[in-house]
Image: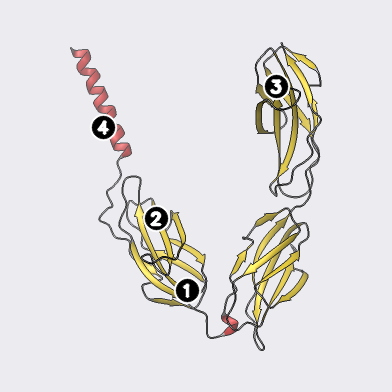
Amino acid sequence: MKKHLAYYLLISIIILSCEEILFEEDITDDIVTIIAPSDGSVIENTSVSFSWNAVDQATAYRLQIARPNFENAVQVVEDTTVTGTNFSTTLVRNDYEWRVRAENSGYQTAYTTAAFSITESEDFSAREVVLSSPQDNAISSNTSVTLQWETVTDANNYRIQLLDDSDQIIDENTSTTNTIQLTFPEGITTWQVRAENNTQSTLYFGRNLTVDSMNPAKPVATAPVNETTLTNTTVSFSWTREVVEGTKEFDSIYVYRNEQLTDLATKDQVTSPTDITLESGNTYYWFIKAFDEAGNQSEASDTFSFTIN
């Protein structure tokens, strides 16, 4: 009887301890106080910073932005969770409504909502060019890239520049529309756009783009050597490959159970050397292919075979 009592006491202590660990403060009745943009704000800037006061015991905040409002939303342009009490983004000219709530693992507050509008400055030179695509720090395997941005009221044309890593201009073009297709060099290039009219121009607004059109080098399989016989089911694979300058490269191994390479035993992203456990009593066929962050891929290495007795 004493043993049973001690056992139940121990279980109760464990349960209480778990409840203490998992306990979260109930923040349901708390209110998130918006700082900016406040309700009814008119902002002459497409770069908008959102801020609010912290809620005690909140671990994150859910922020949403709708156009023109949540009741009649044409688009929810942002729906994100942040751990701090501020968030920045770029928006086009329009009416918006934004809301934020506090959350922890067990509870959440009600949303606090505010409406605001984005307008263009009366001063043409103070207006912003909102870049659309490609996204900042995008990677492309194609040297021919289409650039797009939002139109700026009263602009007659747009000036587009490509800058190298020393901020030297390597190409300059103009366009009367909000898009242009340009040829980029290999590597990291900054592209920037400004709006112009007959007498004024805006500042330049830019993003970075990495172009890598080069395929990784063909890997060379080294072990296990072709047509070898093994007794251990844990097989050590190795290969070599020259690194091609560009984006990050990685290797994938393909191991098949048949010479036609249709019965896949395993495929994985690996580094040389790597150990893989397989079944005995089979003959396997394997090769390596290399890939990079731009989506380029190498030729497959020569296919080697081995048998595990």
Residue type beneath disc 2: Tyr
Q: Is residue 254 above or below residue 134?
A: above
Q: Is residue 158 above or below residue 88?
A: below
- Pick whichever of labels 1 and 2 is earlier in the sequence: 2
Position of 140 compared to 114: left or right?
A: right
Which of discs 1 and 3 lies nearer the camera? The answer is 3
- The residue beneath circle 1 is 94
Q: Check contact, mark 2 vs mark 3: CB within 8 A.
A: no
* Distance Cα–Cα, label 4 vs label 1: 53 Å
- Residue 270, image x and y in percent? 68, 33
- Residue 88, image x and y in percent? 49, 64
* Marker disc for residue 257: 3
- Pick whichever of labels 2 and 4 is earlier in the sequence: 4
Residue at left 26%, top 27%?
A: 13
* Marker disc for residue 61: 2
Looking at the rendered structure, the secondary structure element under dot 4 is: helix
Label 3 environment density (alpha carbons within 10 Å; few <14, some 14–19, many ≥20) = some
Which of discs 4 and 1 lies nearer the camera? The answer is 1
Residue type beneath disc 4: Leu
- Work out which quarter of the rendered image holds the C terminus and state it: top right
Residue at left 37%, top 60%?
A: 100
Instruction: Tell which of 272 and 77 is nearer to you.
Output: 77
Residue type beneath disc 3: Arg
